[in-house]
């Protein structure tokens, strides 16, 4: 049975997943970080595959469950629609590629792992593509072993550099190298600024979209809502201690700029105090009309009691998911009337990009830096 994806470009084309792409394929393991980091990398990999004109093999999302020694691989379309991505570039789910195309185009003896330089692991002069978690579990999900390694350094994956893309195509023509399989994402973190608009092609699956709408209708009907993201777990607090030494920590370029051209990164932007959070929410609520709810997404403490007590005179209700679900949180934040997020967090970065491409307003905690009034200094 044909598994097809419709590409809606200037004309409608039909690309079927059992027809080989003569321009080749690009595969990679999304092996750095959790969902927010993987999403940043995905946009870069999408841009890179288009620049090379290779079909992007959509990897499953790598997830980690408490107490489990090995990562889990969740099919790409559990959360996002491949057909939406196909409006931008050729894509195929990894499950389809491995079952329908790999047996003939990419047999086991021709599977080569790509890495910039050798990685630590069991073998010398090797990418050791399956060494460690999630590397091993990821490729094992599809029964992939590598027969050899290929070091592609000093090439890089800047999709905006035409000369660099030409070097890739000359060194690795599709006729000889039908699949470029990278041990990690061929993309930078955080996402390059020019690739941020590609987020418009990341559309939530029908399941996520439907459940998020139902949650909003059930819990926040009768008025608008402010979405906020709080990163306040112990691991995050420790990371924020390095702000002074890392002026572009994690996703910070989304607010301070890629060269800190919009100002310095401060610890309060990374880990705002309870009083700063409440003051900023109050300022936003006083500025906006018809906000009746504050929806909180958090990795640790949603501060429901604190916010309820602090905002009771403003006639708003505090709402959060129970139990929390990161993808549902993001889908709901994307629909908020307004959003306040964490400058340094790639989770916030996902919500911010989604809102940017549809023109919804957002801001970051403690940014831009506000000079304290005299009465606040006493």
Image: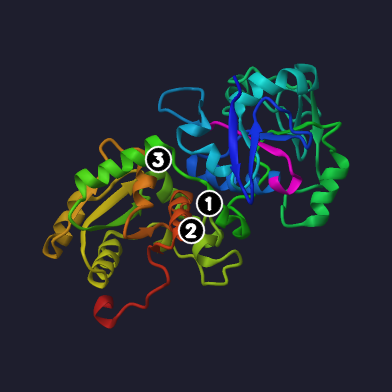
- Which label belongs to residue 327? 3
- Which label belongs to residue 119? none
Residues marked 1 and 2 touching at CB (< 8 Å): yes
Figure quadrant of residue 266: bottom left
Q: Secondary structure at mark 3?
A: helix
Residues marked 3 and 1 touching at CB (< 8 Å): no
Looking at the picture, does residue 11 appear above or below residue 262? above
Residue 302 image position (x, y, % from top left): 27, 48
Q: Earlier in the sequence, mark 1 or mark 2?
A: 1
103 or 86, which lies in front? 86
Q: Earlier in the sequence, mark 3 or mark 1?
A: 1
Q: Nearer the viewer, mark 2 or mark 3?
A: 2
Residue 63 image position (x, y, % from top left): 48, 31
Q: CA distance from mark 3 to mark 1?
A: 15 Å
Q: Earlier in the sequence, mark 2 or mark 3?
A: 3
Name the residue located 59 percent from the left edge and 64 percent from the top edge.
258
Name the residue located 81 percent from the left edge and 43 percent from the top edge.
153
Q: Which residue is mark 2?
A: 357
Name the residue located 35 percent from the left edge and 51 percent from the top edge.
333
Q: Which residues are magenta?
A: 50-61
Residue 343 visible in rendering: no
Q: CA distance from mark 1 to mark 2?
A: 7 Å
Q: Which residue is mark 1?
A: 199
């Amino acid at each position: 049975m044909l598994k097809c994806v419709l590409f809606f470009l200037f004309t409608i084309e039909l690309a079927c997943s059992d027809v080989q792409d003569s321009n080749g394929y690009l595969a990679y393991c999304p092996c750095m970080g959790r969902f927010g980091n993987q999403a940043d990398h995905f946009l870069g990999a999408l841009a890179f595959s288009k620049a090379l004109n290779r079909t992007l093999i959509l990897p499953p999302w790598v997830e980690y469950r408490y107490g489990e020694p090995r990562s889990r691989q969740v099919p790409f379309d559990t959360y996002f629609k491949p057909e939406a991505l196909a409006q931008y570039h050729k894509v195929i789910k990894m499950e389809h590629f491995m079952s329908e195309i790999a047996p003939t185009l990419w047999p086991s003896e021709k599977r080569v792992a790509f890495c910039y330089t050798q990685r630590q692991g069991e073998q010398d002069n090797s990418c050791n593509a399956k060494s460690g978690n999630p590397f091993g579990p990821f490729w094992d999900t599809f029964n992939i072993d590598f027969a050899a390694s290929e070091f592609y350094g000093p090439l890089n994956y800047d999709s905006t550099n035409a000369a660099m893309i030409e070097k890739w195509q000359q060194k690795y023509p599709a006729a000889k190298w039908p699949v470029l399989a990278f041990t990690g994402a061929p993309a930078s973190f955080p996402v390059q600024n020019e690739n941020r608009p590609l987020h418009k092609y990341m559309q939530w699956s029908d399941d996520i979209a439907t459940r998020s709408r139902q949650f909003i209708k059930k819990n926040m009907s009768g008025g608008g809502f402010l979405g906020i993201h709080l990163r306040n777990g112990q691991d995050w607090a420790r990371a924020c201690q390095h702000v002074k030494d890392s002026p572009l920590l994690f996703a910070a370029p989304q607010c301070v700029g890629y060269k800190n051209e919009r100002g310095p990164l401060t610890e309060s932007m990374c880990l705002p105090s309870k009083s700063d959070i409440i003051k900023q929410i109050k300022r936003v609520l006083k500025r906006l009309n018809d906000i009746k709810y504050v929806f909180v997404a958090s990795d640790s403490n949603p501060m429901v009691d604190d916010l309820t007590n602090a905002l009771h005179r403003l006639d708003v209700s505090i709402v959060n998911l129970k139990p929390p679900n990161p993808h549902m949180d993001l889908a709901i934040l994307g629909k908020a009337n307004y959003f306040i997020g964490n400058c340094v967090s790639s989770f916030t970065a996902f919500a911010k990009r989604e809102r940017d491409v549809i023109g919804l307003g957002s801001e970051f905690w403690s940014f831009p830096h506000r000079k304290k009034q005299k009465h606040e200094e006493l």
